[in-house]
Amino acid sequence: FHAHKKEEQENSSTFVSNKKKSSYKDEIEGLEGMLYSFAKCCSPVPGEQIVGIVTRGKGVSVHRIDCPSLDSVPEERLMKINWKNKENPHKTYVTSIRISCVDKLGLLKDILVKAADLNTNITYANVKTNQAKKVGIIEMGVEVNGIDNLNTIINAFQSLPDVHSVKRIQTNSKIKSDPDLQKKAKSAKKKKI
């Protein structure tokens, strides 16, 4: 029994490490063989300028170069990294966009049909309306394989009649997910008190 359990552990750890290597293989220059993840606050996609942040226990967190979360990170934790390719045809990346439009019956359907025409998967959608101003705000996650693909989607949505603007959005979840930044934020709050 113990020998069988040990064999299972060895096989499962081998499987996990192989899976990590194959899913990140040749994706980013400067992170070969290292553990890394993509920041949810700025959702970087291939083709954009990126930077790595060395974290404690989680490897390197990959951010867009213009991510506001970088403002609070010490220089010594930053790593110069680059995408190896402008697009990755074997993987998709989720990023969020905000569409400001006329509050009109059927407009969400038009946007979803346009997404389907572009073979774009929508991972989530949230619709808010301001009936007094007759404005609708649609926030959605779209799967893309690179920045050119994202720009094509944004331009296609922007070309729809009754759409005012389409912009990429960022969240400020970095402090919530990074223990080092949580400590800094708590320390800064204590100093202000």
Image (spheres, rainbow, N blue to C red):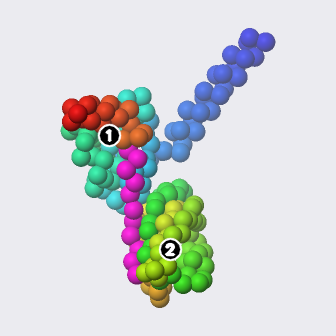
Q: Is residue 166 magenta?
A: yes
Q: Rounded to the nearest whole Å, what is the CA distance between mark 1 and mark 2? A: 37 Å
Say which amino acid is labelled 2.
Answer: Thr
Callouts 1 and 2 close, C-beta under 8 Å: no
Residue 144 place in picture, x, y as percent? 49, 63
> Does residue 179 appear in the picture of this structure?
yes
Task: Give the residue at x 73% y 12%.
Answer: 3
Residue 27 on image: x %, y %: 43, 49
Where is 74 relative to 3, above or below? below
Q: Quadrant of residue 171?
A: bottom left
- SS at mark 1 in the image: strand
> On the picture, is 28 further left or further right than 115?
left
Residues in magenta, as a range? 164-174
Q: On the image, numbered disc 2 is attached to which residue?
A: 129
Q: Which mark is residue 191?
A: none
In the rendered image, residue 103 lying in the magenta stretch gets the answer no
Which residue sits at x=38%, y=37%?
178
Q: Residue at x 51, y 70 (%)?
A: 128
The amino acid sitting under disc 1 is: Ile
Q: Quick one: which residue is furthest to the top in this view?
A: 2
Tell me, for residue 53, which label it has, or none: 1
User: Which mark is in front, 1 or 2?
Assistant: 2
Coordinates of residue 47 in the picture (x, y in percent): 36, 61
- Does 125 appear above or below 38? below
Q: Earlier in the sequence, mark 1 or mark 2?
A: 1
